[in-house]
Amino acid sequence: MKFADYVRKTREASGLSLRQLSKKADMTLARCFAIEKGEARLNLPQLVSLADAFGFDSGSEFLKKYERTLKAGDEKEPRKRKAAVAAA
């Protein structure tokens, strides 16, 4: 699973629309859309904002859950995983 897909699935599981996420994360709607499409790279403040919007205590907790998702077998290509985490 790509990080962008993880963000989208987390948003959907949280019951948030893209517009609601953008407001909670204090980002533009276009930015959130680009993140979910994998067309934008996240910087650390954006990662923290997303994590907070989803109710995580920290950006690292958000990334750790993503890593656990990958280890559960959702990702077969480690190079892509490393690139997604580095992009975050």
Image (cartoon, grey):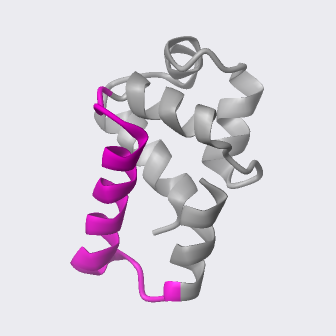
Q: Is residue 9 above or below residue 31?
A: below
Left or right of 21, for residue 74:
left
Per the image, is 25 magenta? no
Residue at 57 percent of width and 54 percent of height: 4
Q: Nearer the viewer, residue 45 or 73?
A: 45
The N terminus: image quadrant: bottom left
In the rendered picture of this protein, how many numbered marks are placed on residues?
A: 0
Residue 57 lies, with reference to residue 74, above or below; the image says: above
Residue 47 appears in which quarter of the rendering? top right
**Relative vertical location of residue 70 with respect to residue 77 in this rendering, above or below:** above
* Front one among 58 and 71: 58
Task: Give the prevailing secondary structure in the magenta stretch.
Answer: helix
Q: Give the x, y percent position of residue 56.
A: 30, 33
What x and y, as percent, mark residue 39? 77, 52
Segment colored magenta? 55-78
The residue that appears at 61% across and 15% down in the rendered structure is 26
